[in-house]
Image (cartoon, rainbow, N blue to C red):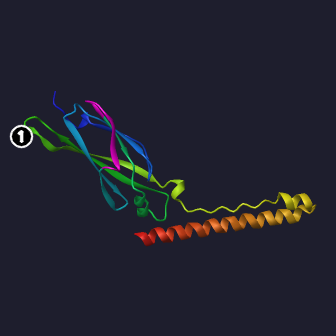
Amino acid sequence: MAVTEKDFTLSWGDITIGAPNTIAVTRPSSQYSFRFRCEFQGVTVNLTTPELMIVSQDDTRVVFQWTPDESLSLAIPDSVSGTGTLTMTVAYTSRFEQLSNPEFCVKTYDFTAYVPDSMRPSATLTVALYFYAKESSDTGVVFAIAAILMLLTMLINLIADLVGRYFRRKQQ
């Protein structure tokens, strides 16, 4: 039976930038190996070590772990996610060099990449109104202070987001 492009499958999900992501590939035999290229929002990256590592393999399956470099997030300065394409090039290696084929087939897969919360700009303002409320019987004043502090927190978060976008654009 002849081996065709359909004999190779890749399974994975959406990815998180800067975090380990799993790519599992099935193949007809261990004579087939793989190269990967990622195109993400205008940035092209050939996946190599140390970002791409083989976690396990046998004759018919290879499991890779890919940790996209955090700099990939610079391609989406005004967003927390973006879409891209992973290209898998399958190579066939034979004992007889004339039968080997470095580009047996090429398959592409779409994906969505997310910027993790730890890389998103944020700010937190925590103020305890408990002591004031305990000593003051004027709940209207306590409510007004709480509303002002909530608006102030929203303003600080907005400023942090804008500053983060500015610096991510500046790094490009």
Q: Residue type at mark 1: give it.
A: Gln
Quarter in which the C terminus is drawn: bottom left
Q: Where does residue 167 sit, x and y in percent of width and height?
A: 48, 70
Residue 137's spot in the image, x, y percent? 93, 61
Q: Out of 14 and 21, give the one closest to the viewer.
A: 21
Decide: is 28 above or below 138: above
Provide the residue designation for mark 1.
98
Q: Residue furthest front?
A: 50
Q: Residue at x 25, y 35 (%)?
A: 6
Q: Quadrant of the N terminus?
A: top left
Q: Position of residue 126 (x, y in %)?
A: 72, 60
Task: Judge from the rendering whether residue 59 lies leftward or rightward of residue 112; answer left or right.
Answer: left
Q: Residue at x 75, y 65 (%)?
A: 149
User: Would you place residue 164 above or below residue 83 in this image?
Assistant: below
Left or right, 60 with reference to 19: left
Q: How many marks?
A: 1
- Badge 1 crowding class, 10 Å Cα cut-off, few under 14, some 14 to 19, many 20 or more, is few
Q: Which stretch did the figure color magenta?
A: 49-61
Q: Secondary structure at mark 1?
A: helix
Is 6 a magenta residue?
no
